Image: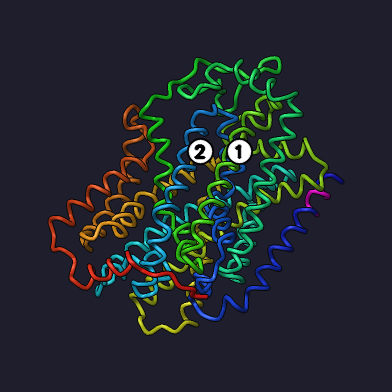
Amino acid sequence: MTDKLDILLAMAGYMLIVVFIGVFFAKRSQESSKSYFLGGRSLGPWVTAMSAEASDMSGWLLMGLPGLAYFNSPAEAIWTAIGLAVGTYVNWLIVSKRLRSYSIVSGDAITVPDFLSNRFQEKKKIILGVSAIFILIFFTVYASSCFVTCGKLFAGLFDADYHTMMLIGAAFVILYTILGGFLAESVSDLMQAIVMIIALVGVLIFGVIEAGGFAEVIQNAKDIPGYLSLTKTATPVLDENGAQIALNGIAQFGQPGSYDWLTILSTLSWGLGYFGIPQVLLRFMAIRKSSELKSSRRIATVWCVISLAAAVMIGIIGRSVFPASATLNSASSAENVFAELSQLLFHPIVAGVIMAGILAATISSSDSYLLIAASAVSKNIFEGIVKKDATDKQVMAVSRVVLILIAVVGAIIAWDEESVIFNVVSFAWAGFGATFGPVILFSLFWKRTNRAGALAGMISGGTMVFIWKLLLKPMGGLWGIYELLPAFVLSSIVIVIASLLTKKPSAEIEEEFEKAKNYKDEVLA
């Protein structure tokens, strides 16, 4: 009981620091909707990079990815990590500077729907409305994954009811997001990104020691059929309840499954998602000088590579330390392997701080998701379409109501305690990647892209994610690939065809494209 109390006190101390950051920036964030939703374009390179990665990775980095590597095999986790690492670097390299410049040139846009609508100089705000709706849908799903993380973490730590813990976590996130806005979120994300990487590396190092050394970890992994292969997956033998069977303390595995080149390609396509992830794109728009994006790119890429590699290795180490754990014997419960290792390896106070790493990841993501989804409704639908003369005060009031409604729906989705965090995140990630990734790339780099092409591409990409996931993927075989890849390809093709078959952009739009392309940097803060 004392150990649990020490863990709780350490986590509570961490959360008090997070709340203090929210209070500190609250007054500044309430100055205007631009300050609340984009921080007045005042972020430095470290805050930009670290907040982008912390809000992007979320609790699935510390729970979902290690759990995937632990329960099935590292193959899917490794190919996913490689795709994400490459996607991170390329996104910062080619998208960040152009998007920041273009968002300023095209009416000083402060949200992704704002930018897309301004980019095509809409009079009837159809792109604005459609993009806001897709953001609302997928971020509600995304937020639910964070609430699942909170519920699993606290229920596992304190033997408490999952539903109660999930609701408490959701309530805290809502309160913090309403209080501090984008700037508080971004600054606290810097701290949380540091906590996350320290926690990952710490558990990795001491986990290897606990397992008897790196050679012992690898040997244990080799003893599991197909476990260490990048072209096969281990196959846990499950009972009727989905729990892995163990005999005489040895977890049972069947014949390894195949992980062919098409599956590898579709798993690598996780990297394509980065081009359409709003919380990352907003950081590109919010940095104070585009010349600082080069530093941010290096910081973000290094953080990403280290964190992803450590998360995958923690899953592998977990198989050595907990070869047949009764508390990690299903795809859902295996996502607690990071928390179980932390409690085993460290003093309760230290474990509490490390547990705060999971909470940090969850909060840094869920407040981003809620804030961006609320801005999509309040700024893009309410002010942009419904009430164009809305005051900042009215916009802020609507955003807070929307925050609560989104959180309620997210909590309903998260009610199933058998939810697998990785699966929930993968669907929302595919949704954003296919809906916004192609249209962002074509809008920034192809002058011939027009409004019809952009709109058709968004709708086809977002819709195909649902069709592939719910109707085609269950058929297996060729249809079993990750829905992001076919949806992204379809959206890209549709954008090109629809743009070429319809009227070319006006001279004003083409002139603005060239202006953004040649935009000279300036300090906006």
Instruction: Read off the residue under disc 1.
Output: 311
Residues 418 and 344: in front is 344
6 inside magenta stretch: yes
Amino acid type, callout 1: Ala
Is the residue 443 above or below the residue 348 in the image?
below
Counting residues from the start of the chain, the first of labels 1 and 2 encountered is 2
Graded by Cα atoms within 10 Å as few (under 14), some (14 to 19) or many (20 or more), the crowding at tag 1 reads many
Q: Position of residue 48 (x, y in %)?
A: 54, 61
Task: Indicate left or right for 35 with 474 as reference.
Answer: right
Which contiguous range is marked in magenta?
A: 5-9
Task: Indicate left or right for 18 with 29 as reference.
Answer: right
Q: Residue at x 66, y 15 (%)?
A: 247
Task: Indicate left or right for 236 with 116 as reference.
Answer: right
Instruction: Read off the residue under disc 2.
Output: 81
Q: Residue at x 30, y 70 (%)?
A: 515
Q: Residue at x 50, y 28 (%)?
A: 75
Picture quadrant where residue 418 is located: top right
Give the Cα separation between the discs numbered 1 and 2.
Answer: 9 Å
Q: Main secondary structure of the magenta part?
A: helix
Amino acid type, callout 2: Ala
- Proximity of marks 1 and 2: CB atoms separated by less than 8 Å: yes
Picture quadrant where residue 176 is located: bottom right
Q: Position of residue 101 (x, y in %)?
A: 39, 67
